[in-house]
Image (cartoon, rainbow, N blue to C red):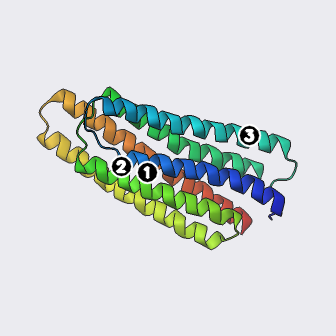
Amino acid sequence: MFSRNKKDQFGALLHDMTTNVKEAADYFSSFSVEKPEDVTIFAQTVNEYESKGDGFVYQMIVQLNDTFITPIEREDLLELTNRIDDVLDGMEKAALSFEICHMTHLNDYISQMTAEICQATENIAEAVDCIFNKQLQKVNDYSKNIKQNESKCDDLYREALLELFRVEEDPIRLIRYQTVYEDLEAIINFCEDVAKTLNSIVMKNA
């Protein structure tokens, strides 16, 4: 299934991609606001991570076009690349919402959801490395962890919305928080899509 040179070539690139996603999620989850302009800096920084991710996607497409034999099916490599990129795109969209909605207060729901997202990206990074180290059973284990992250985030999302519509009387604040919650929920769903793609690759190559 794997030839060493091709494994190193594509595995190294995907490792760099997932490392970038993980670093973006670490930054995202540790973000705190001390002054209003911090939100703008936050959005700009996440955009830089996303732009770096786009560069990796371009490199993957070039490598796929230049390589006759790939370690796993080229369609799977491209699908995995795109699903990982979706996670970064989701972070960029959420960061923009933080800026547009002037989110100067991050409540416990936001903190807990971003923590689950951060853990999911760590699981993604570990799982992708396992693909190219032929540790396919571990890939399934990490995929289960991602699903647990997604499930916890779903619970937080429901609780956050219930609380928001129960106590918030300011319609503008309600819209702001609802938008941010929805964007965070979208990110964790993108993480689950990565897990599904990983599971599909394992089934094909087991």
Judging from the image, what secondary structure is the residue with disc 2 in? helix
Q: Nearer the viewer, mark 3 or mark 1?
A: 1
Q: Which residue is mark 1?
A: 26
Q: Which residue is mark 3?
A: 61
Q: Earlier in the sequence, mark 3 or mark 2?
A: 2
Left-right relation of 17 to 65: left
Q: Position of residue 106 (x, y in %)?
A: 25, 43
Disc number for residue 204? none
Residue 30, numbered circle:
2
Classify mark 1: helix, strand or loop.
helix
User: CB under 8 Å between callouts 3 and 1?
Assistant: no
Instruction: Say which quadrant the N terminus sits in.
Output: bottom right
Q: Report the residue at 59% width, 40% height from top.
A: 53
Answer with left or right where residue 146 lies relative to residue 152: right
Relative to the observer, which residue lies in front, 36 or 78?
36
Image position, residue 64 (x, y; %)? 79, 44
